[in-house]
Image: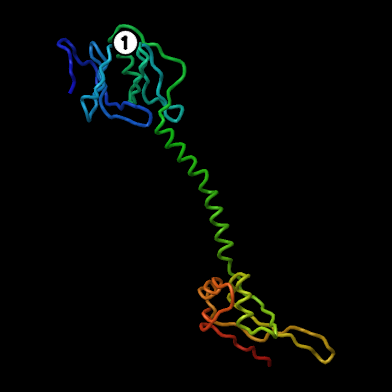
Amino acid sequence: MLDLNLEEKVVLKKPTSLIDGLNQKPGKLYITNERLIFEDSKNSSNNIYIQLSEIKSYKELKVFYKLTSGFDLVLDNGVHYCFNLFGGKSLLLKLEEVRGSSIEKEVGVKHHLLPNIIFGLIVVFFSISPIISGVGNLITIFDNPSKTESCNLYYDRNTNQYILLFNHVKNNPYCEKYTVFMDYEDNYGNVSWKPWSVVTDFSKEEYDEIRKYQYYSKNVPMSGFKFTPIDKK
């Protein structure tokens, strides 16, 4: 509720917000034939009454460094009141008309911090999102190696086939098929590697489970697959 003088009349009224740093108080801005009045919509004890003759100058309030969103009034005593409102230019013109003299426009602008900060955070978010996504993809690549169609294992006579497979899984990508090769020596002493067996029914889940272990253990799920001998005919 406004506290008007006996002969005081409202000339113009506009919705506005009083800005103090990052805080904003919603309310209404009134021009009367005597004063400029800010009415706090939540607490009338916070209403501000300014004599028209006390207004010294103003700066434009900017959003995103370009769009005008209000003005910052400077009084003769150095006090500032910053108002965010639509149609601030028309209000200033009416204010000059009612008081009968122009109001000095200061060089420079006052920046509306809250939307500028929000806009800056949005820009930063979209700038670093591709970087974060790229790092995440790299982590995924190293943590979850890509699948290949076939892998060859070369049998070591001092190691059984299961340990051979386990050691390979620990350091290589998942394969759909694992073929174990055995070395053969002919009558002339020449050594060649020939396919001996194939791992069947080895799932990606078993592969992931095996990679969790640091050493060979009976707890490793080996029961879901088997080595099938290759027909040598």
Q: Quadrant of the C terminus?
A: bottom right
Q: Is residue 204 left or right of residue 51?
A: right
Q: x, y percentage for residue 63?
A: 42, 29
Q: x, y percentage for residue 84?
A: 34, 26
Q: x, y percentage for residue 113?
A: 41, 30
Q: Quadrant of the N terminus?
A: top left
Res 7 → quadrant: top left
Res 85 → quadrant: top left
* Residue type beneath disc 1: Glu
How many residues crowd around disc 1 within 10 Å: few (fewer than 14), some, or many (20 or more)?
few
Instruction: Determine whether 182 is above or below 50 in the image.
Output: below
Task: Say what secondary structure mark 1 lies in.
Answer: helix
Taking the spot 18% from the left edge, 18% from the top edge, the residue there is: 3
Point out the residue furthest to the left here: 6
Taking the spot 56% from the left edge, 63% from the top edge, the residue there is: 143
- Residue at image mark 1: 54
